[in-house]
Amino acid sequence: MRWVNRRVRRGNSIALGAIPIAALLLLYLVLAAGRHAANPNDKILPLPGAMAEAMAALLFQPDQLSGKLLFWADTFASLQRLGLGLGISTLSALLVGLLLGVLPPVRATFGPLVTAIAVVPPIALLPILFIAFGLGETSKVALIVIGIAPFMIRDIAAHVAALPKEQIAKAQTLGASSWQLMLRVALPQAMPRLIQAVRLSLGPAWVFLISAEAIASDIGLGYRIFLVRRYLSMDVILPYVAWIALLAVSMDFLLTWSSRRLYPWAHGAGH
């Protein structure tokens, strides 16, 4: 059997996916052990014991100034900003994407504007956002929205505009208005695509969040990483990066699971 025709069972898929991760962890341990054998005070590749010791203080010991458990406070602050940014972007993509996809006059009028905004590097707008909205939460959330919403809007609009013309014609034959076409024909088919767009936007959203927190913030995962880097505290940076990766993977898994449960027909169920 050719490799292109092979199908991997779910249990085997999990095992195969774990192999590269385990190999990377093993490689890290070997390299870290080698560096510490040559220099016991090496900070670049800390051993697991050093990372556990450094993280224990952030996880379980209240900060002397704020009284907060810094790790959990950083996580809550970052997730709150990310959630607001993703929520606003998702709602905008759904509403504006449907209008652009279903109504050609709206697409002709506002499509070029959305495209122009989408091609502007969001990081370049960060100083403008800080000047316009200050250094508070609004500018950080706005950067996420500006960074991912235009892409999501274009994706949903293109998907809706590419729906089979036969569906539109049949709905109009049955007397459907433009709003009924939007709500009963386009909306159900746009929802799985919207979830996919959110999944694809998770990576850029985290990039914009970390960037904003690194520049102007006093709490958050990105703030903590860039705060301790001046001390070469890799025993904190690496666990924080791993935690961000775990959060992102968990979000991606939940979105995929939700899409399969809510819209099985979009994933080939029953075929």
Image (spheres, grey):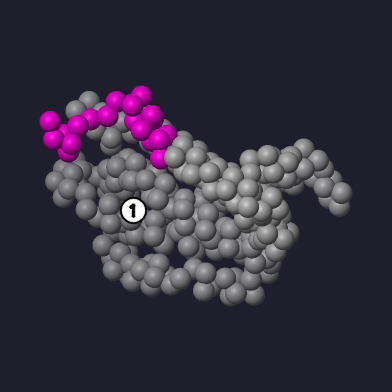
Looking at the image, the residue that sits furthest to the front is: 38
Q: Position of residue 125 (x, y in %)?
A: 53, 73
* Most common SS among magenta residues: helix
Number of other residues with Cα within 10 Å of mark 1, as a class: few under 14, some 14 to 19, many 20 or more:
many
Give the residue displayed 46% in from the left and 37% down from the top: 22
Quadrant (top left/top right/bottom left/bottom right) for the C terminus = top left
The stretch of residues the image draws in magenta is 1-20
The reply, left or right, for residue 138 in relation to residue 87 is: right
Q: Amino acid at mark 1?
A: Ile
Q: Nearer the viewer, residue 44 or 79?
A: 44
From this view, report whether residue 213 is shown above or below residue 243.
Answer: below
What residue sits right under mark 1 in the picture? 156
The front one of 234 and 74 is 234
- Residue at image position (30%, 64%) is 107
Residue at left offset 27%, top offset 51%? 160
Q: Position of residue 219 (x, y in %)?
A: 71, 55
Toward which corner of the image does residue 140 lie, by quadrant? bottom right
Identify the element where label 1 is drawn: helix
66 relative to 151, above or below? above
**Looking at the image, can residue 78 be seen?**
no
Asked if the magenta segment contains residue 234, the reply would be no
Return the residue nearer the eye: 110 or 75.
75
Query: Looking at the image, can residue 121 be seen?
Result: yes
Task: Check if residue 8 falls in the magenta segment.
Answer: yes
Q: Residue at x 36, y 24 (%)?
A: 11
Q: Quadrant of the N terminus?
A: top left
Number of disc labels: 1
Q: Measuring from the top left, give residue 98's x and y in whole percent.
A: 34, 53
| Quadrant assignment, res 192 | top left
Where residue 12 appears, as percent x and y from the top left, is 33, 26
